[in-house]
């Protein structure tokens, strides 16, 4: 007879020390634990090709984690923030800086070994690097805007025989004019044998580059294969688009990372929405392979199976993180599976071999769009298990109670919104609630999986956002161009949604015309560029931003994809003091049992220092970087936007065991590794998500040597 879950939890409490809880958890399911081989390195983004952010190291454990001290820090001397997950190979830590330089540090001391500067001005996300070796040769692959460089891992010098003078250009080989493309690599590619497989970040409005998945020879930089995420004539999925969509639609891209089953020779790829994000009249159909989990033959790019999570996405419901390759107990047998988290707060679990869902998926009906030209999908698929790890509908009963005034204002605003849960189409002239918001649910930091217990750890945002549609105005002036290309992020009134989406009010006082022109054409930070705009159009936009004057220009080739309606801007649902206008938790850390589909525990993650000082603690907050789980019984996570902390939780119970202070909020994902018998946890701390100062520091923690840190 199988023990009840309460019985199992009581057993877990009794067996916490020394990792015995993990053994009991697995034994209760009739499976013997099979410990992974001990690995001292952190060799890839996400910890390794499986992308499970798990470490076999256990020198730091439940009993001693409270003694952690700072072992070393490295200051890049740059501002701009960090979203990296550093890698560590053979005692060397490889990572990037806020301005996208690549650095190699002694992993035991933080001492700089070498640095590479491409001289390309880098801003925005650059989440790390990729390591490849063969025999005596070792290379670091790094993204610098739309280029990918191959560097000698020992010296940091470009490898001249790779591509053209050490780099390849992602604007090429897309079947469209390279000079009109806007694509960059923000999340590192993955390695399969001698192939570097990459996705890319594309513009989310039109025109946009297609988000093809591509594999390059690691030695020569030669393109080996391409998978068309927007299918061409004759390819699977072509019928889910208008017949010419492959020539003009963009995105459907992998921006969040991939995972590789090296033994099977399969790469698992998660994609985002097609452009434009919020109005799809010119892409009628389900739009394969947008919002899709793909299993591709890693050697050839051939599709093996796929699952589309959102049909004809008009809510920007990208798959936000790389899939995790896990092994679980299902119906009494061990199954190699793939787990995929989502922005709307669900986990999908599939048999890795053929894509069979391990828990049933229901196709539920949702209301159609009432906007002219828009045709939404009749049904959307949701798993019956696991239950969602974030709340699914914003209702009056969960509006903020922080103060009577805040509640009253929130109620008044809420009653002007359309709020019906998931997949409610946007309307013209009235905002619709998206909850969880545009930044998740799950986010790009990804999840961690513990092969000892089959628990998946995922952090979540519980923030409500709103958005709506408005008519595109007629005309060929700077205002029309701004509304068509810029207002989706910066809003009609130029105020944006800081700090993620900056205000453009008074931008002329902060940047000169040349800087603004370069940003509009080439992009910056999370903004993609608009290389198809003519210079006359660019300066018409600048004149509108500076003076409000709407000067007509002769349009170039940039406007044939303009549509009747446009997105009117991202809006967080906040109260007058800037706090979320809903009841806490505003961010959580969750443990989900992938064997049963049950949630093991959930705890608030993060807090607002000003509220905590008044005794309002454990509210949770926005959080981005992901967790790391270890054989030592711990889950390490920073990620929180406001409180500048890294935390260690007991992986069995969710109990907070340790907090460490950071110079800036740590919105990247930690890494843990061992050098010379000492285990370290390194945290990228760069801030940038709270609207305050940003930087670029790496902080490593370890146990004291001999009871005292030198």
Image (cartoon, helix red, strand yellow):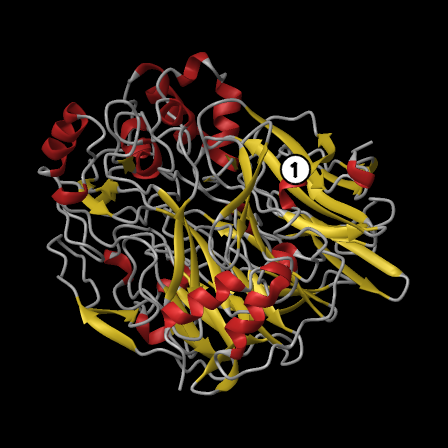
Quadrant, the N terminus: bottom left
Determine the residue located farthest toward the front in the rendered image: 14
Is the residue marked by circle 1 packed among few (<14), some (14-19), or many (20+) residues within 10 Å? many
Quadrant, the C terminus: top right
Determine the residue located farthest toward the top in the rendered image: 509
Q: Which residue is mark 1?
A: 100
Quadrant hosting residue 684: top right
Secondary element type, mark 1 = loop
Tell me what residue is drawn at x 45 percent, y 39 percent. Answer: 530
- Compare residues 339 and 57 and report the one nearer the observer: 57
Q: Where is 652 relative to 524, above or below? A: below
x, y percent for residue 574: 26, 31
Q: Where is 525 relative to 274, above or below? A: above
Q: Is residue 251 visible?
A: no
Tell me what residue is drawn at x 79 percent, y 34 percent. Answer: 708
x, y percent for residue 242: 30, 67
Q: Where is 363 relative to 347, above or below? A: below
x, y percent for residue 34: 64, 77
């Amino acid at each position: 007879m199988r023990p009840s879950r309460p019985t199992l939890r009581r057993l877990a409490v009794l067996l916490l020390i020394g990792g015995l809880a993990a053994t009991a958890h697995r034994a209760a399911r009739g499976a013997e634990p099979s410990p992974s081989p001990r690995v001292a390195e952190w060799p890839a983004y996400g910890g390794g090709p499986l992308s499970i952010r798990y470490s076999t190291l256990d020198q730091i454990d439940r009993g001693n984690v409270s003694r952690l001290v700072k072992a070393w820090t490295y200051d890049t001397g740059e501002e701009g923030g960090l979203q990296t997950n550093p890698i560590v190979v053979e005692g060397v830590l490889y990572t990037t800086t806020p301005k996208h330089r690549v650095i190699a540090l002694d992993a035991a001391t933080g001492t700089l070994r070498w640095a590479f500067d491409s001289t390309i001005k880098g801003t925005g996300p650059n989440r790390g690097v990729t390591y490849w070796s063969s025999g005596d040769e070792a290379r670091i692959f790094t993204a610098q805007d739309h280029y990918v460089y191959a560097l000698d891992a020992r010296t940091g010098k470009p490898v001249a025989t790779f591509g053209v003078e050490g780099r390849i250009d992602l604007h090429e080989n897309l079947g469209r004019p390279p000079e009109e493309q806007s694509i960059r690599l923000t999340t590192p590619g993955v390695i399969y044998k001698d192939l570097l497989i990459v996705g890319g970040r594309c513009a989310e409005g039109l025109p946009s580059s297609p988000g093809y998945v591509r594999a390059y020879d690691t030695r020569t930089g030669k393109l080996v294969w391409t998978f068309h995420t927007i299918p061409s004539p004759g390819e699977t999925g072509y019928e889910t688009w208008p017949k010419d969509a492959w020539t003009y639609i963009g995105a459907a891209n992998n921006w969040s990372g991939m995972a590789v089953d090296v033994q099977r020779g399969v790469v698992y790829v998660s994609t985002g929405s097609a452009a434009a994000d919020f109005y799809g009249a010119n892409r009628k159909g389900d739009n394969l392979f947008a919002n899709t989990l793909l299993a591709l033959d890693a050697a050839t790019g051939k599709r093996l199976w796929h699952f589309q999570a959102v049909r004809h996405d008009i809510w920007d419901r990208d798959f936000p993180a790389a899939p995790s390759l896990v092994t679980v107990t299902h119906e009494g047998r061990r199954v190699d599976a793939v787990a995929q988290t989502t922005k709307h707060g669900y986990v999908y679990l599939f048999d890795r071999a053929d894509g069979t869902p391990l828990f049933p998926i229901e196709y539920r009906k949702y209301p159609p769009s009432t906007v002219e030209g828009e045709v939404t999908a009749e049904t959307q698929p949701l798993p019956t298990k696991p239950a969602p790890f974030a709340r699914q509908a914003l209702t009056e009963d969960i509006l903020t109670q922080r103060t009577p005034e805040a509640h009253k204002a929130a109620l008044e605003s809420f009653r002007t919104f359309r709020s019906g849960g998931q997949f409610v189409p946007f309307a013209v002239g009235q905002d619709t609630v998206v909850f969880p918001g545009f930044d998740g649910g799950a986010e790009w930091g990804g999840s961690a999986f513990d092969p000892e217990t089959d628990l998946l750890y995922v952090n979540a945002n519980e923030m409500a956002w709103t958005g709506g549609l408005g008519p595109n105005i007629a005309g060929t002036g700077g205002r029309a161009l701004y509304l068509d290309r810029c207002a989706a992020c910066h809003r009609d009134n130029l105020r944006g949604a800081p700090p993620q989406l900056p205000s453009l009010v008074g931008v002329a006082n902060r940047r000169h015309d040349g800087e603004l022109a370069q940003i509009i054409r080439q992009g910056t930070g999370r903004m993609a560029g608009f290389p198809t705009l003519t210079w006359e159009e660019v300066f018409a936009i600048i004149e509108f931003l500076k003076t409000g004057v709407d000067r007509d220009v002769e349009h170039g080739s940039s406007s044939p994809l303009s549509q009747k309606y446009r997105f009117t801007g991202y809006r967080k649902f906040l109260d007058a003091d800037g706090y979320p206008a809903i009841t806490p938790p505003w961010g959580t850390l969750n443990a989900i049992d992938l064997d049963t589909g049950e949630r093991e525990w959930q705890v608030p993650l993060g807090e607002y220092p000003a509220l905590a000082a008044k005794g309002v603690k454990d509210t949770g907050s926005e959080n981005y970087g992901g967790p790391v789980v270890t054989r030592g019984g711990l889950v390490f996570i920073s990620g929180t936007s406001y409180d500048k902390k890294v935390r260690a939780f007991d992986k069995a119970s969710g109990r907070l065991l340790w907090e460490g202070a950071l110079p800036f909020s740590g919105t990247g994902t930690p890494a843990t590794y061992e050098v010379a018998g000492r285990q370290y946890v390194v945290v990228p701390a760069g801030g940038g998500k709270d609207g305050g100062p940003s930087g670029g520091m790496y902080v490593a923690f370890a146990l004291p040597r001999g009871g005292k840190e030198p």
